[in-house]
């Protein structure tokens, strides 16, 4: 046993639990913890410019590599409330992050002390556990419980609130004998998997739907192995994108109202059986359950018991970690294949592959207009980046069109907050990914409005030498909201453009595009370049990579778009509006069905 400050015990426990990196902003009420971090020197720290940014950096750090748990730290009061958005985003997508906040001394709680707020109560709905530790001796066990909860069952975030006097109090603690608590993950039984395969055997046109739980469980290779053994095509969800490579013959496309492929929706509608693994049947994936479920049976495998039947009642449910379930699916499928018990699915798989290759089920991207159409930007991105690129994005028409046109070949190479979708997430998360993996090729994708949220975090990349490419598609609009407002016959409070009085002759901001993102980026210590035409994109990327190598800072590549483009989406998976095809038909142009995507 050794005597130490409770804050030191917290640092030692984090070390034992594998933490080597934190993101945050110091402040008076959390300085005791920072003092112990400084004394130990074992946990690196990135200083954010906004505490919400720190929480999203922690998310990006967790999402980048299996086993990572991002840590974000802030002081009392607004620091905690600023991080609630990050906690919500992490909770929504089952991402474990640890948020640590300072708090007023215990004697000053409930006395309206400066920056004293009951952050544990505020954060409780968006965390697996949120607690204010009132007894110094409980600090090490609170941190032990936090890591146990974050890793057990459905992963998720935890908040620990530490009053200043709790942090500085002396306690007895023996770190030498400390061990992390065993992680609990429910596992499918062999009988359950056999029953699921028996049900699959009765299907003519089955599909696998792979959710983010497959990636969280680091089970993508098992998913592909099972799909290949059984010959069943795979539909990844937006959070599961990359679990099977886009160019794999069994990758059948994505399904949904927005972030989907035409051939993916067509294949789902042609199916008669769906085995969902690690997914939650999100409404942007399903649309109405009446359309999504009609004419097909479902098996749902998920780590969280209360997810089974939450959106609709499956024909069979299995509560299991995705990796544990897929290990059994592979084991049983191998045995059955050796015994000749698995049906030949080659005709169905070929039919799905033919849909994927069909020109009639592609979307056009080969536009030559200036200003550029966004579809052409994604074609340029596909041409400029190789199979190993990692995309980071959040929400908006930029993300939706990106999901329709980009290609992802590896798990954890599409890093996206799927359910919460907070604007400003992209830059912060990309920095977290870069900290987690110094060598990866990282490309962030933002619309201009997402980029303007938390834009100050670019300075973090400059200060800490965290280079990545940030592509900003700029139409000076809240594009997704503008498109949604069509249903109200209005275009109201969604225009970001204005005549910037500081724009020089010929500058894009002098044409009513408003904010000069290049000057802002350069003012924050980064490099930036602007693209107007498709033939400028490739050279811009090469210049960006040269700058990253020379200066080690983020590089912004801004692409000027036409002001209004409607991106394909709809109210049901069988009722997606292909706006560009409609426009081409109205103009008498060749239909997009004849043009390669």
Image: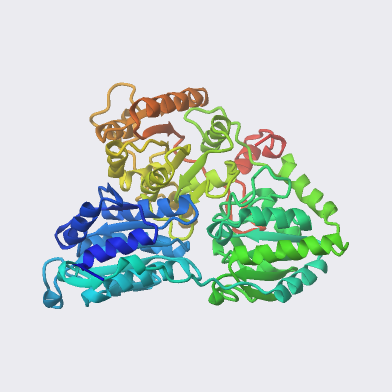
Nearest the camera: 169 or 442? 169
The residue drawn where x is 11% and y is 71% is: 113
The residue drawn where x is 53% and y is 59% is: 216
Query: Looking at the image, is 253 positioned above or below residue 114?
Result: above
Nearest the camera: 510 or 342? 342
Q: Is residue 576 left or right of residue 20?
A: right
Q: Is residue 453 left or right of residue 353?
A: left
Nearest the camera: 483 or 124? 124
Residue 308: percent from the left, percent from the top?
59, 75
Residue 288: percent from the left, percent from the top?
61, 67
Q: Is residue 72 left or right of residue 434?
A: left
Residue 71: percent from the left, percent from the top?
34, 57
Residue 508 shows up from this direction: yes
Q: Quarter of the image containing the N terminus?
A: bottom left
Q: Quarter of the image containing the C terminus?
A: top right
Query: Looking at the image, is 363 positioned above or below residue 184?
Result: above
Residue 314 shows up from this direction: no
The residue drawn where x is 81% and y is 48% is: 350
């Amino acid at each position: 046993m050794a005597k130490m400050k409770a804050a030191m015990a917290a640092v030692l426990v984090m070390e034992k639990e594998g933490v080597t990196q934190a993101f945050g902003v110091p402040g008076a009420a959390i300085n005791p913890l920072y003092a112990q971090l400084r004394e130990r020197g074992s946990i690196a720290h990135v200083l954010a410019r906004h505490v919400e940014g720190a929480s999203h950096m922690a998310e990006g750090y967790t999402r980048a590599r299996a086993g990572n748990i991002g840590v974000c730290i802030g002081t009392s009061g607004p620091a905690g409330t600023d991080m609630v958005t990050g906690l919500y985003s992490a909770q929504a997508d089952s991402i474990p992050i640890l948020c640590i906040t300072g708090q007023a001394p215990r004697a000053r709680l409930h006395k309206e002390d400066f920056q004293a707020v009951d952050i544990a109560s505020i954060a409780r709905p968006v965390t697996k556990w949120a607690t204010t530790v009132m007894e110094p001796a409980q600090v090490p066990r609170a941190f032990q419980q936090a890591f146990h909860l974050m890793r057990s069952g459905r992963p998720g975030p935890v908040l620990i609130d530490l009053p200043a006097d709790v942090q500085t109090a002396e306690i007895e603690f023996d770190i030498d004998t400390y061990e992390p608590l065993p992680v609990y993950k429910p596992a499918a039984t062999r009988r359950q998997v056999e029953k699921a395969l028996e049900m699959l055997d009765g299907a003519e046109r089955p599909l696998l739907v792979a959710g983010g739980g497959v990636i969280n469980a680091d089970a993508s290779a098992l998913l592909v192995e099972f799909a290949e053994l059984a010959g069943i095509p795979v539909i990844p969800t937006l959070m599961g994108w990359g679990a099977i490579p886009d160019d794999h013959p069994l990758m059948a496309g994505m399904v949904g109202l927005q972030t989907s492929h035409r051939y993916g929706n067509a294949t789902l509608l042609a199916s008669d059986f769906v085995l969902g693994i690690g997914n939650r049947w999100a409404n942007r994936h399903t649309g109405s359950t009446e359309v999504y479920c009609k004419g097909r049976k479902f098996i749902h495998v998920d780590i969280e018991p209360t997810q089974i039947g939450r959106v609709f009642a499956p024909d069979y449910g299995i509560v299991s970690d995705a990796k544990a379930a897929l290990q059994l699916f592979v084991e049983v499928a191998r045995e059955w294949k050796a015994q000749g018990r698995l049906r030949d699915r080659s005709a169905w798989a070929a039919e799905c592959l033919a849909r994927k290759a069909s020109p009639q089920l592609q979307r056009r991207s080969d536009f030559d207009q200036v200003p550029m159409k966004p579809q052409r930007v994604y074609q340029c991105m596909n041409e400029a980046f190789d199979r190993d690129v990692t995309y980071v994005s959040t929400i908006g028409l930029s993300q939706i069109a990106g999901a329709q046109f980009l290609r992802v070949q590896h798990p954890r190479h599409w890093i996206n907050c799927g359910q919460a979708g907070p604007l400003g997430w992209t830059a912060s998360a990309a920095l977290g990914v870069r900290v987690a993996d110094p060598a990866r090729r990282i490309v962030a994708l933002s619309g201009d409005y997402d980029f303007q949220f938390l834009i100050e975090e670019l300075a973090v990349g400059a200060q800490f030498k965290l280079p990545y490419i940030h592509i900003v598609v700029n139409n000076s609009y809240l594009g997704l909201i503008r498109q949604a407002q069509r249903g109200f016959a209005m275009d109201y409070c969604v225009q970001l453009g204005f005549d910037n009085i500081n724009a020089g002759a010929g500058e894009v901001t002098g044409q009513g595009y408003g904010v000069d993102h290049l000057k802002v980026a350069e003012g924050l210590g980064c490099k930036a370049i602007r693209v107007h035409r498709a033939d400028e994109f490739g050279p811009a990327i090469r210049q960006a990579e040269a700058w990253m190598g020379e200066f080690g800072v983020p590089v912004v590549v801004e692409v000027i778009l036409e002001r209004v483009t409607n991106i394909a989406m709809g109210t049901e998976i069988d009722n997606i509006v292909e706006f560009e095809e409609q426009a081409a038909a109205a103009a008498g142009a060749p239909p997009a069905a004849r043009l390669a995507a």
